[in-house]
Image: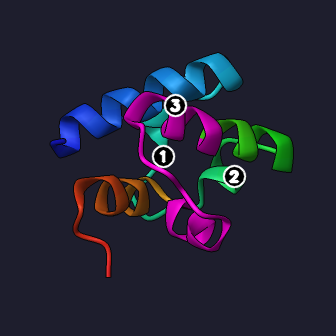
């Protein structure tokens, strides 16, 4: 997946979880939970939706890698460390 594809997918998922959230106003390295006022259940729903949309298993140990948009792009794009 390209960065644009991942970003679009993240925006679609977050629109369903937090419709008032404006992903375009969030810096790539900003913490999504803080920037979009997501609670722990919102974040779990976000991770579950990423798994559902991509078919990729996301172990709980990897959740911190998904805390920023840049992290999600790196993780799903296969460039995470």
Residue 47 shown left or right of residue 74 in the figure: right
Element type at mark 2: helix
Residue 26, numbered label: 1
- Asked if 44 appears above or below 18 in the picture, the reply is below
Q: Nearer the viewer, residue 79 or 22?
A: 79
Magenta stretch prevailing secondary structure = helix
Instruction: Please tell me whether mark 1 or mark 3 is closer to you in this view.
Output: 3
Mark 1–mark 2 distance (CA, rounded to whole Å) = 11 Å
**Horizontal and vertical percent for residue 60?**
67, 65
Residue at position x 38%, y 36% in the image: 54
Residue 26 rendering spot, x and y as whole percentages: 48, 46
- The range drawn in magenta is 47-67
Say which quadrant the C terminus sits in. bottom left
Observer-side mark, 3 or 2, equals 3
* Residue 54 is a magenta residue: yes
Residue sitting at 33 percent across and 53 percent down?
A: 76
Considering only order in the chain, which callout, 2 or 1, is on the residue closer to the N terminus? 1
Q: Quadrant of the N terminus?
A: top left
Disc 1 to disc 2: CB gap under 8 Å: no
Residue 55, x across and y down, in percent:
42, 37
Secondary-structure class at tag 3: helix
Instruction: Tell me the number on the disc at residue 33.
Output: 2
């Amino acid at each position: 997946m390209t960065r644009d594809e991942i970003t679009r997918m993240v925006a679609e998922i977050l629109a369903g979880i937090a419709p008032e959230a404006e992903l375009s106003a969030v810096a790539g390295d900003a913490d999504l939970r803080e920037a979009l006022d997501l609670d722990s259940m919102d974040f779990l729903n976000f991770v579950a939706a990423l798994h559902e949309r991509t078919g990729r298993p996301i172990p709980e140990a990897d959740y911190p890698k998904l805390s920023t948009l840049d992290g999600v792009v790196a993780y799903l794009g296969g460039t995470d460390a």
